[in-house]
C-alpha cells in the first residue's frame, strides 16, 4: 500500500439520525392476561433467526460497511436499525407482561430453546446484495408477524404487532427505493 500524505477519512456523520417509522402512534403495551405460549411466539420475533435482533445487527453491520461509499444509504439503514430497536423494546414489554422471560433465547412450540447468534445474519459484500438480503428479511418478518397475529387471540397484543408490521412495510418501501437507485 502506498503511503499518502493525506489521511484517509470518512465524512459520514450519523448524529441526529431518527427512527425510520411510520408517522403513526403505537398502541399501548398491554395484554389481556398472562400467556406463556404467546410470550414464546413473540420471543421468535424478538430474537429468533428472523427477528428484530437480527435486523438491528444486520442493518448496523451493513451501515458500517457502507459508511465510506454509501453514506446516504447508511443513514437510512441506521434509521431502520433504530426503528427495530424500538420494536424490540415493545416486544420485550409484551413478553414480560405475558409471563415470559426476556432474553436472547427464542422458544418455539415443541422445539428446543434457541439462542440468538451472528449466524442469523446474512452479510454479503456488495451493497446491492446487502439491500437484497435486507429486503428478504423484512418480507420474511412481515410474514412471521402475520402468522403470529393469526395465532394470538389477544387484541391488545395483535394491535402492537400490526403497528410494527406497518413500520416493516415502510422499510420494504425504503429498501426497494434504495435498490432502484443502485
Image: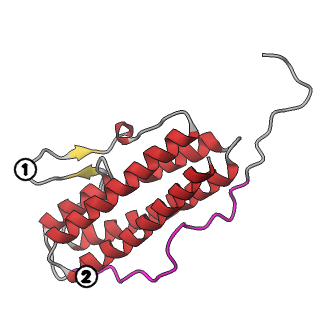
Q: Quadrant of residue 67?
A: top right
Q: Would residue 9 appear left or right of 36 to someone viewing this image?
A: right
Q: Which residues are magenta?
A: 13-31
Residue 136 - label? none
Please, which colouring scheme is shown? secondary structure
Q: Secondary structure at mark 2?
A: helix
Residue 44 found in image quarter:
bottom left
Any part of residue 100 in sight: no
Quadrant of image for the N terminus: top right
Instruction: Give the residue number, with chain letter if any, for mark 1.
Output: 110
Residue sticking out furthest to the left: 110
Work out whether residue 80 or residue 171 is closer to the camera in this orientation and state it.
Answer: 171
Q: Is residue 24 magenta?
A: yes
Residue drawn at x 92%, y 26% is: 5
Residue 181 can be seen in this image:
yes
> Can you name the residue that lies furthest to the right here?
5
Q: Is residue 24 above or below residue 51?
A: below
| First in sequence: mark 2 vs mark 1 | 1
Count all numbered tags in the image, as a single digit. Answer: 2
Distance between the Cα atoms at labels 2 and 1? Answer: 26 Å
Q: In the displayed structure, does residue 134 sit left or right of residue 67?
A: left
Q: Nearer the viewer, residue 35 or 4?
A: 4
How dense is the environment of label 1, judged by Cα within 10 Å: few (below 14), some, or many (20 and up)?
few
Disc 2 target residue: 156
- Counting from the top left corner in percent of width and height, residue 13 is at 73, 54
Amino acid at each position: 500500500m502506498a503511503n499518502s500524505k493525506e489521511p484517509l477519512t470518512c465524512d459520514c456523520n450519523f448524529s441526529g439520525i431518527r427512527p425510520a417509522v411510520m408517522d403513526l402512534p403505537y398502541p399501548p403495551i398491554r395484554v389481556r392476561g398472562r400467556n406463556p405460549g404467546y410470550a414464546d411466539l413473540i420471543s421468535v420475533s424478538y430474537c429468533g433467526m428472523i427477528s428484530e435482533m437480527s435486523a438491528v445487527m444486520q442493518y448496523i453491520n451493513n451501515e458500517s460497511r457502507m459508511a465510506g461509499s454509501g453514506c446516504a444509504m447508511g443513514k437510512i439503514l441506521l434509521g431502520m436499525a433504530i426503528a427495530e430497536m424500538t420494536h424490540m423494546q415493545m416486544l420485550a414489554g409484551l413478553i414480560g407482561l405475558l409471563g415470559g422471560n426476556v432474553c436472547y433465547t427464542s422458544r418455539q412450540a415443541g422445539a428446543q430453546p434457541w439462542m440468538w447468534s451472528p449466524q442469523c445474519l446474512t452479510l454479503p459484500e456488495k451493497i446491492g446484495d446487502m439491500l437484497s438480503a435486507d429486503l428478504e428479511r423484512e418480507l420474511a418478518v412481515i410474514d412471521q408477524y402475520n402468522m403470529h397475529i393469526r395465532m394470538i387471540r389477544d387484541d391488545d397484543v395483535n394491535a402492537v404487532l400490526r403497528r410494527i408490521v406497518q413500520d416493516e412495510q415502510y422499510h420494504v418501501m425504503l429498501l426497494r427505493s434504495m435498490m432502484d437507485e443502485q
